[in-house]
Image: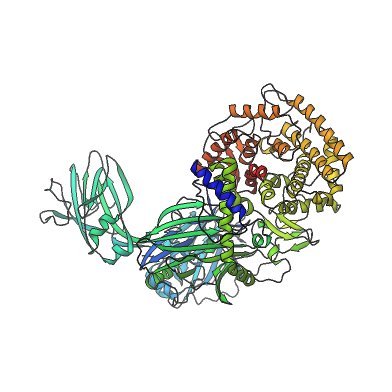
Amino acid sequence: MKKYFIICFFSIFLGACKSTPYSDETTKNNLRVPAYPLLTLHPHMKVWSMTDELNNQNVTFGGSKQLPFIGFLRVDGVMYRFMGSKELPMQTIAPMALDHEKWKGKFTCLIPDEGWEQPGFDDKRWQISEGAFGTPGMWEAKTQWVSSDIWVRREVDVDPYLLEHKKIYLRYSHDDVFQLYINGKQLVSTGYDWGANFKVEVPDSILQTMKGGKAIIAAHCENREGGGLVDFGLFAEEPTIPVETLAPISYEKEWTGKYTMEQPKENWETAGFDDTAWTEGQAAFGTNDQRNVRTPWFSPNIWVRRKLTFDPSLVKNKQIYLCYSHDDVFQLYVNGMQLVSTGYEWKSDLRVNIPDSIADTMKDGQAVIAAHCENRMGGALVDFGLYAESKEARQKSVDVQATQTHYTFECGDVELKLSFTAPYLLDDLETLARPVNYISYQAKALDDNEHDVAIYFEIDPHKAFDAGQSTQMYEKDGLALMKTGKENQKLWVNKEREDRAWGYFYLGTKDDVTCAQGDAAEMRAYFMKEGDLKQMRKSNEKRYAAFAQKLDVDSDFPQHLTAAFDGLYTMAYFGEDLRPYWNKNGEKTIEDLYVEAEEEYKEVMAKCYEFDRQLMADAYLVGGKEYAELCALAYRQSVSAFQMSESPEGDLLYFTPQVGPVDEYYPASPLYLRYNPKLVEAMLNPFFYYSESGKWGKPYPVHDLGGYPIVNGQTVGGDMPVEEAGNALIMTAAIAKMEKNASYAEKHWETLTHWAEYLLEIGTDTGDQLTTDNFAGGCHHHANLSAKSILGIASYAKLAEMLNKKEEAKKYMDAAREMVKEWEESAYDGDHYRLAFDQPDSWGMKYNLVWDRLLDLNLFPERVIQKEMDFYLTKMNEFGCPLDSRHSYTKTDWTVWTASLSTDSTTFRKFILPLHKFMNETKDRVPMADFINTDRTTIVDFRGRSVVGGYFIRLLEQK
């Protein structure tokens, strides 16, 4: 009750103030969300974290591709990784088509002269083409090859630094007999075989020939039968970073320890124990059926001790961990303190971090690892090794708000707050349309002492974006920027990939940062040593980009990076190439955008925090804590699906990539009606234009208008006449209700009249028309679709009344009332109403009826609503009420609409709590889905869509 009072007061207080000073307080969202939104810049440019711990794995781009985006905090010389995976991927020297990258080579299908594999061979008569080379049907193949043999030569530039500091590997795919040479020396030779993504280390004898910075990779393949393929690339792998080996496990390198098979004296596990009588042996210790065993052991027990000496600074600066394998019962100690104790089991390649309590005993660079293993049956094994890697920050909390996702981490004696902000303020079109997100960070001392703190971000966008990516760092007008995208982009030419985004991704700031491009491992090591990237050497490696910045500990306001996306154009709109709203006149540059975003950073951040608090307070009041948490998660997901432009006629356009369909805007509309009805007008503008231009010519709205990037008419599915006419009429009436005038409807009155006349002509029974829920199976004579049609007719009547068109208002409202009587009689099925008029014992959610109360239409008797709600509650599963009687799955947006049919908050929460429970427990770590199972924790489909804006329908009544 106390918390409820506080939130009520907070809501009233915020509403009474025109503006508030900056405050980073939030009403904490405790929902363990399925996926955490980080950067949401464009419908095709979104970055998510799919795990509860931000440093558990790399973030995800576009819902499926891993994006290496790494963050370290350096505290007094110690590195803590707070974001991204610890794994450092292989560095590409020359890419493979297998990785969806492009490469070129010379080839011939005629037997070449001797020496064809040598660097000095004259290949000027060979053809130049794009790799890979293969027969039709090989998806990697960019150049078709149908002869029995092919010879390929490829010249590669190699940074000599890599040869000195990294292991070099060749990766290749082939089908069938295959030989490959580097600088004339053979590296691969196969028999009649085929396979993909083989990996072989390049030996020193070949590396010596590459020191001049050039390599000629030459390959011959003989295709004896079926498919043929030649694909290869050169890669570098860091041998020591991010892991340093203090003492290897046996499968990396043999090691020596002391052992005994007789019960030792007390304190055998301590560092000071006298083990001179023990036998020296080589690991691993075990039975001969185990791998890498060098000291056989067949007795019931063995005790092993291993003394280690290492750089003591590693204990302070790194996370020390132990890898071990054992068979059977096993105990392991470090300097006399127990670290591992198992029951009767056998496992290999396990890992355990050395806790601070044990690490404190290792500060002098000395450690004794002691192990005891009891072999109860069968094989036996004892093996272990000690390693060091960068420390992981301890994540203390994560909080998903409407416009922001906040993390806090403990990094030694410093706390880091990290926030990802998408300034989606729907009542401020200029800010909303700006494709800018902020990554903010703030350091706070936990021990009241001074600390030297710096932050480091590193990104490899090539892993996520399409092939042909180019990344460059540059400075301009005080800005330090990274730009990445495909070079020489040609508008709308890629017909094979119309789902991809044209444009460029930017990351940078006007703050005092240092930045570099180069080898990731080298940049990390340099930053760890220096705390910046000022003198970082220039490298031929251009894929990785990094930013470093010194942090002001305990500052009142965060520092930040700004992420932006320049989509160039939003779409080709009926022959006109439209620019994004922020650059609608084509006069702004991305640097202008950055200047605006940087100047307004503090003000925008204050507004975002204020908006997030207000949304949570408002949603809490009408639906409780769980409802508020769902709305906070739904907000950014829905808004990030839209772009904004102006039509050639000057009308505002707000659209998803497909530009519709109307039956996706309809469920999303409550969010936008709640915060800015003008955006719902902007959703409908293209559909009114299409009908009024004469391009459509049918008495109901088009389903969709084409889809990114070409918008010139319907492309998806067939017509949905009643569905879309009802949607458009209801949405237009809702706009008028929220704006308290019908001027938008008056502007399109003739078109609205055609749509209302069509619905009136169809009548109560809509026959065999498609519905928005057709994914659940075709359903003729659908009662919920009929209800939408009736409400659409009544919406038209309501608009006519607002425009003082009294005769039309009476005609259509009277007709709607008569249709309701027919509906109730046709749908009646005892204790509920049917899914379809002609299907006894069927049932389904009548979620469309929610508009009867929201629009003050008052058509359907209260007994209809009450009977339906009572019946739905008898059909509830663990995670909600099914959509209808045919399946156990449901739609989450319709669930919230159905819950909102009741004005009783207790009944409303009976629908919301199972939905909240599903989102909190689902095993599918994807952006919030709207098509889920109600009897298990898995989704069905439809993830990351805008329709979750429908969650806000309960808030419309409050507005």
**Location of residue 894 with respect to 95 vertically, above or below:** above
Nearer to the camera, 471 or 622: 622
> Quadrant of the rendered structure where residue 569 is?
bottom right
Q: How many marks?
A: 0
Nearer to the camera, 124 or 375: 375
Tell whether 667 sits left or right of 295: right
**Location of residue 129 with respect to 255 vertically, above or below:** below
Residue 173: x and y in percent read 50, 58
Residue at left offset 89%, top offset 39%: 807
Identify the residue at the far right of this view. Answer: 807
Identify the residue at the far top of this view. Answer: 830
> Quadrant of the rendered structure where residue 655 is?
bottom right
Q: Is residue 172 visible from the viewing direction of this image?
A: yes
Tell whether 614 sits left or right of 172: right
Q: Is residue 107 visible from the viewing direction of this image?
A: no
Residue 646: x and y in percent read 75, 61
Residue at left offset 65%, top offset 59%: 432
Residue at left offset 72%, top offset 50%: 660
Tell whether 674 sits left or right of 614: right
Residue 622: x and y in percent read 60, 41
Tell whether 37 sits left or right of 850: left
Colour approach in the figure? rainbow
Nearer to the camera, 832 or 907: 907
Residue 811: x and y in percent read 87, 36
**Location of residue 775 with respect to 54 vertically, above or below:** above
